[in-house]
Image (cartoon, helix red, strand yellow):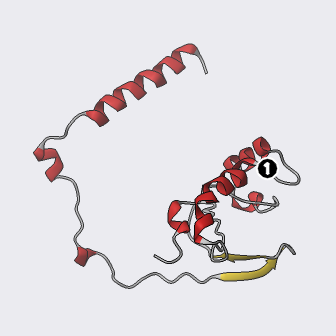
Amino acid sequence: MSDTEYKSIIDEGVELKKLQDKEESPEVIATNPTLSISDIDPTPIEYPIHVVQNAFKSGIRVVTHEVASSGIAYVDFGLDLSMIPFEDAILLPSLITLLNEAGTTNSTDAEFRYVCITHSSKEILDHDFILIDSLVSTALCTTC
């Protein structure tokens, strides 16, 4: 990329930020499409799921379902926290950090993050552990 192209991209980004920060007039806001509850189909979409017990001889249960996603893998990682005493729940953020930063048997933490960020769904399944997002604090509350 040339210096001119780079500067052009920076300038476009600055202009876009200015447009995004600009407050819209009531007339412009009135042209935005809106939805009401009656516009939404109340019937939930049921996706067929596939369950594999002891996937890759790991003792892990894998639940998958296909959705139209343009080849993007949406991965959620869950832990059964029911065996953790409530008093120890405060330690779970440390576990999450460890899972995100420890790497795997075959990959350093940097290699692992690189794989998670750069590979698509079929390629990423070849690795021995998948964790894309940190677990959220709502996972801590199993009795709420």
Quadrant of the rendered image containing residue 42: bottom left
Quadrant of the rendered image containing residue 66: bottom right
Q: Which residue is mark 1?
A: 103
Q: Position of residue 143 (x, y in %)?
A: 50, 78
Query: How would you rate the neighbour count of disc 1 (Cα within 10 Å): few for under 14, some for 14-19, many for 20 or more?
Result: some
Q: Is residue 70 above or below residue 109?
A: below
Q: Is residue 139 above or below residue 59?
A: above
Q: Quadrant of the C terminus?
A: bottom left
Residue extending farthest front: 87
Q: Position of residue 86 (x, y in %)?
A: 58, 70
Question: How many numbered dots are placed on residues in this image?
Answer: 1
Question: Identity of the amino acid at label 1?
Answer: Gly
Q: Is residue 142 left or right of residue 61?
A: left
Q: Is residue 5 above or below residue 93?
A: above
Q: Is residue 36 left or right of residue 53?
A: left
Q: Name the residue located 17 percent from the left edge and 52 percent from the top edge.
A: 31
- Of residues 91 and 1, which is closer to you in this image? 91
Q: Position of residue 40 (x, y in %)?
A: 30, 76
Q: Name the residue located 50 percent from the left edge and 65 percent from the top edge.
A: 138
Residue extending farthest left: 27
Q: Position of residue 34 (x, y in %)?
A: 22, 62
Q: Secondary structure at mark 1?
A: loop
- Of residues 68 and 50, which is closer to you in this image? 50
Q: Name the residue located 17 percent from the left edge and 49 percent from the top edge.
A: 29
Quadrant of the rendered image containing residue 33: bottom left
Q: Quadrant of the N terminus?
A: top right
